[in-house]
Image (cartoon, rainbow, N blue to C red):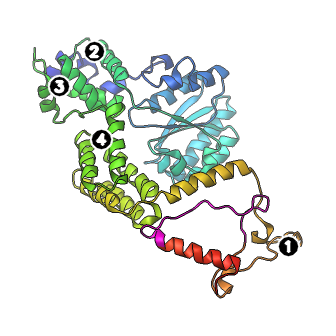
Amino acid sequence: MTDLFQSAGLEAEAPRPLADRLRPAAIDAVIGQDHLLGPDGILTRLLASETLGSLVFWGPPGTGKTTVARLLADETDLAFQQISAIFSGVADLKKVFETARARRLSGQGTLLFVDEIHRFNRAQQDSFLPVMEDGTITLVGATTENPSFELNAALLSRARVLTFKALDAAALGRLLERAETETGTALPLDDAARESLVRMADGDGRALLTLVEEVWRAARDGEVFDMDGLQAVLQRRAPIYDKSQDGHYNLISALHKAVRGSDPDAALYYLCRMLDAGEDPLFLARRLVRMASEDIGLADPQALVITNAAKDTYDFLGSPEGELALAQACVYLATAPKSNAVYTAYKAAMKTAKSAGSLLPPKHILNAPTKLMKSEGYSEGYVYDHNTEAGFSGQDYFPEALGRQTFYDPPERGFEREIRKRLAYWDKLRRGEAP
């Protein structure tokens, strides 16, 4: 194996992974992320202004988040320090902050790169706030999870979220060419196998270079792999479609519409098509959760419970065992009563909330913890619903300037039939018509 690796021109750097050897030394050498690093990219503009501010990089693995953070430190003359939320605790953070303070006193700032920042709990995330505010550190956090759900609102309010995209086929192709240039050796693949290798990487540059190393290790002198040979030596199949292109969106659209159309057989078919094509099962799990809220809603409140349980089951079991839980959730959704009443109500309420601006809630529903607030009328006239005979006071909770609004209109389907009865009864109570 050593001889084979040497024949690929890797003998001098064998201990270093190819991904590390090809790490760009300058910001303009980064492949991909043109929306951030191109001539009109956000990061390009920030560098031109010579002020970065704290940032959160959100995107899939192998898209350059760590590399770009390191290069930003070089471009701004900041000391680069990296920690991982997986291996760091409160004591580690205190040491990092103390070092950054000392460095600042000597005239140099610190760019603190925090990998997997979403792994920190809420209290740990809060510990960053003072050192971000006083300029001790410029924080650059990296996460593969949606920051809106995983990071504190206070931290997000002090950092700009930048989205990193999976590398497309063209970017991965340029990365292959750079690997061949660096090693001085062409990949032993025919054109079809080369395209297949790019699809196997699934938009992950680091994964691509790991596969490249595997190919060079496996190839004998003069051997060139076709697509079947490549799959045999790597023991994996290329996805049937490119997840960043039309095939991905067409199939997820078909799955969603089959569920909405209450066709469990078609829904299962498209779910299996995507799993067989190499789709990320957790992407499918997230879409099933979305369908539970958007298309079933309160017609069957268990739909959201079932889909979240399926996601957790896949997290626990992995592939292929966990895929059965996704199939179970898919069939459950397809056979559940359908309602988009909550989805429609949410959009209407959001539109009204945005247009209403800063209207204050009516004073009678606001607490009055101080004498001054009580004298101002806070809480005056509020009726505690549990003290009424029906457990319902019928008070108006909307801002006075807005008046009562109706957003939610449940249909006569599934569990929402019962909700509709309750709302009708409460409406009669509100009008004084019910006993």
Q: How busy is the neighbourhood of tag 2: few (under 14 within 10 Å), some, or many (20 plus)?
A: some
Residue ID at (66%, 27%) = 51
Q: Nearer the viewer, residue 158 or 303?
A: 303
Q: Residues under labels 2 and 3: Cα distance?
A: 14 Å
Task: Give the SS element for disc 4.
Answer: loop
Comes first in the chain, label 2 or label 3: 2
Task: Give the SS element for disc 2.
Answer: helix
The disc label shown at residue 180, or none:
2
In contact (CB < 8 Å): disc 4 and disc 1? no
Q: Residues under labels 1 and 3: Cα distance?
A: 78 Å
Q: Residues under labels 4 and 1: Cα distance?
A: 58 Å
Residue ID at (19%, 25%) = 215
Residue tagged by mark 4? Answer: 279
Comes first in the chain, label 1 or label 3: 3
Q: How busy is the neighbourhood of tag 3: few (under 14 within 10 Å), some, or many (20 plus)?
A: some
Comes first in the chain, label 4 or label 1: 4
Residue tagged by mark 1? Answer: 374
In contact (CB < 8 Å): disc 1 and disc 3? no
Residue 99 falls inside the magenta stretch: no
Which residues, given as a range, are shown in magenta?
A: 396-417
